[in-house]
Amino acid sequence: MDFKYDVIVIGAGHAGCEAAAAAANLGSKTCLITMDMNKIGQMSCNPAIGGIAKGQIVREIDALGGYMGLVTDQTAIQFRILNRSKGPAMWSPRAQCDRNKFIWTWREILENIPNLHIWQDTVREILVEDGKIIGLTTLLDVTFRAKCIVLTAGTFLNGLMHVGRTQLAGGRMAEPASYELTESIAKHGIEYGRMKTGTPVRIDGRSVHYEEMETQDGENDFHKFSFMDTSVRHLKQLPCWTCFTNEETHRVLREGLPDSPLFNGQIQSIGPRYCPSIETKIVTFPDKEQHQLFLEPEGETTQELYLNGFSSSLPMEIQIEALRKIPAFKDLVIYRPGYAIEYDYFDPTQLKHTLESKNIENLFFAGQVNGTTGYEEAAGQGIVAGINAHINCHGGEPFTLARDEAYIGVLIDDLVTKGVDEPYRMFTSRAEYRILLRMDDADMRLTEKAWKLGIVKADRYELLKRKREAINSIVSFTRNYSMKPALINPVLETLGTTPLRQGCKLVELINRPQVTIYNMAEHVDAFRRELDKVTERKEEIIEAAEILIKYEGYIGRERIIADKLARLESIKIKGKFDYNSIQSLSTEARQKLVKIDPETIAQASRIPGVSPSDINVLLVLSGR
């Protein structure tokens, strides 16, 4: 049989779900192909969404009309804001989720999106004609015709799992790998390599001595992931727990190293630097006497627990023996051991910023196949790829995000400009404009763009407009309302801040560390009445207004820097130069510029190996 679609998405992980939903919501006839319809949106590793910088990405996906934030809010069993002791640029939301409810919530959403079909099968080969995608074939011998294809196969391409010296083919435990597809893509000149990631042991909660651990409760305030006006908590909220490894644990692990695939040569590929296995930790930090572990619930009712911090591919008996040296796990019973998995990925420098291949027209890549790690990084790529696949089908300007607009923009620019030599994970430190990319203002940055594209509907856009008006009204009031020393000084003294010698505007007081919008409203009736005008999402709006007031100077300075550097973003150089013929460029710069073929001077400046003097040469040749 022959099926015809505008967009076909291969893989229903976090990238695939967002890509398929975005393309379909924009109006493309879309098909999502997955090996297993019962594993849509599966959390292959830890049952959590968000974290440092990752939480900001989820809020950006939500602001663009994606679903990860909505699904997380509906299935969260614990919510926290990380980095509260730091400034708002560093605040990051994180939620533990019910793994199974997360899957079924995603499936319910996808099955009810118009224009979106789901097909259970394994893709065998992409079909290319004259350098352009025309379709694919599957193991069921079905041919699909498509204008665009988005590949989001995760760890399934030639996936190989390791538990000690035991090797199992598969993309996840008990799930088959995908064969032939990598080769069908590589024959068109697309380079690929191998990467590794891992996952920890899953523990039976009935065997845990919780009294030997420290409880880590969640938070229950107004914060959540979605900007939509949704209920905050649907499910029972559960704690996590923490404990530490010890010298006896490390001794057992060291004795098992000869059977570790990471150290006996069995695994050659590179694993994630920032989420190392427990055996890597004890080798890298031999003098460290303990490592912290986090025990996380997998769901609202299940006894299954995830041991964060103990990823391992050691033999099962070594994993169990080492953990039983920890008091909390002295009677440990497990559901399955930790394991490592090797899989194929494609060099992301072969992609445009739209995530379309430079080699094959209308073929897009998103997620771990681009060398990233993390559900959030995958989903952020997925929504961008899905939007651009729709645009390629129906016309329109390519959709890209700049580094000063979104963490998603930083992520994609890093991938296509610098490439990867290890699984890429997002951190706030990767973003040079992180004061502009806060979790509180993702909707202010991105929802207008999504509205113009047509992926955001009227209800979300109207919600944004009301929020913006309410924030502007509060900030304007503080800038215009005068405070008299006689009336406010007693309050300032109780707050431990210097009394006024003369009158000032309210905004000047709120700029002080000890002063907040709330404690001023308690004592200034006119201000309290102004805040009472906010009738929806009041806490969210007041928090956003206070951040704008207190950090106005920092935000303004960073915006000036970003605007200055934007000049380099406007200088287009793609296709203008034969870099090999420019002898005034360094040899390394010529090689890198030929490989990446940057769109702009700004992108060229971010390529490793291209120096400031090389950029000056390009500026002169560009007539700037």
Image (cartoon, rainbow, N blue to C red):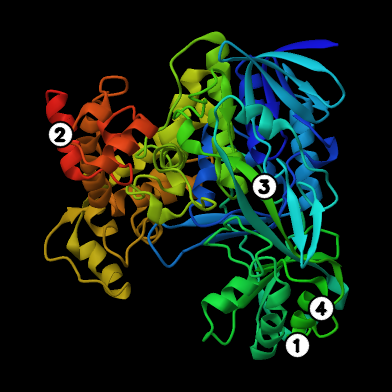
Task: Tell me how far mark 1 sits from mark 2, CA to CA.
Answer: 63 Å
Q: Is residue 356 above or below residue 584?
A: above
Separation (CA) of disc 4 from disc 3: 33 Å
Horizontal side, residue 520 vs residue 463: left or right: left
Q: Residue 367 versus residue 132: which sits nearer the camera?
A: 132
Whether residue 452 is situated above or below residue 206 in the rendered picture: above
Asked if disc 3 and disc 2 are in contact, CB closer than 8 Å, the reply is no
Q: Report helix, strand or loop for mark 3.
A: strand
The answer to which quarter of the image holds residue 67 is top right
Q: Position of residue 201 (x, y in %)?
A: 77, 67
Q: Secondary structure at mark 1?
A: helix
Q: Is residue 228 visible?
A: yes
The x, y position of residue 391, in whole percent, is 53, 16
Amino acid type at circle 2 is: Val
Label 3 – label 1 distance at C-alpha: 36 Å
Q: Are marks 4 and 1 in contact (CB under 8 Å)?
A: no
Position of residue 256 measured from the top left corner of the image (x, y, whole percent): 72, 79
Tell me which amino acid carries mark 1. Pro
Q: CA distance from mark 3 to mark 2?
A: 40 Å
Q: Which mark is residue 617?
A: 2
Residue occupied by mark 1: 327
Using the numbered discs, state the Cα–Cα distance from disc 4 to disc 2 in whole angstroms.
64 Å
> CA–CA distance between discs 4 and 1?
9 Å
Q: Where 9 falls versus 327 (above or below)?
A: above
Front disc: 3 or 1: 3
Q: Residues within 10 Å of mark 1 (few under 14, many from 20)?
A: some
Name the residue type under label 3. Answer: Tyr
Secondary structure of the residue carrying numbered label 2: helix
Q: Which of the two discs, 4 and 3, sits closer to the camera?
A: 3
